[in-house]
Image: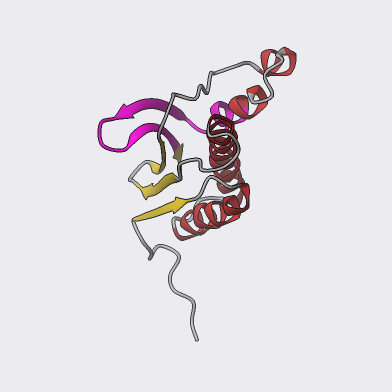
Amino acid sequence: MQDEPRSVGPEQISLQIPSRYSYLRIVRQAVGDLCAQTCVSEFKAAQLEMAVDEICAELIEKLRQRAGGGGAQPLLITLRRESEGIVTEVFYSGEKVQFPALSAAAAKCTEDPAALGSYVVHRFVERVEHFRDPERGWCVRISKAL
């Protein structure tokens, strides 16, 4: 049995996961698979996996805190191949969760436990956008060049 060519595969993957950390492995697997099918280097794929993981983990943390530990709304994640690279969108509901662009020094010196994760996100991808989608709630969109 032959493997499929690496350039063949879905143009977009959509996942809806409960706000539980155990589901992050499914998200990482989807990111890794799409990167492999797109012929992204292992280094860039690992960077994208870490950035997506940090976004989702921080959102899960904040959403669970706001919901009192349980009953947090699920996350909707879309991964999409585009001509310049891979675009990931993570949709969530409720109040906006901040992902500020910080220097490494600032991330180390702050009391905010999420600061280092925010630094990783901004360091490992080319573009980070955060906006409100009228139909799906807040969206954190990141772009990783090929």
Along the viewing direction, whichever of 28 and 85 lies nearer the viewer: 28
The answer to whether 26 is drawn above or below residue 118 in the figure is below
Name the residue rendered at 49%, 76% in the picture.
3
Residue occupying the far bottom of the picture: 1
Tell me the quarter of the image containing the C terminus.
top left
Decide whether residue 136 is among the magenta residues.
Answer: yes
| Image side of residue 5 versus residue 58, left or right | left
Estimate the x, y position of residue 138 in percent, counting from the top left. Answer: 38, 31
Estimate the x, y position of residue 22 in percent, counting from the top left. Answer: 62, 53
Name the residue rendered at 33%, 45% in the picture.
83
Name the residue rendered at 67%, 19% in the picture.
112
Name the residue rendered at 37%, 49% in the picture.
81
| Image side of residue 119 versus residue 19, left or right | right
Along the viewing direction, whichever of 54 and 12 lies nearer the viewer: 54
Magenta stretch?
120-143
Estimate the x, y position of residue 118 in percent, counting from the top left. Answer: 59, 26
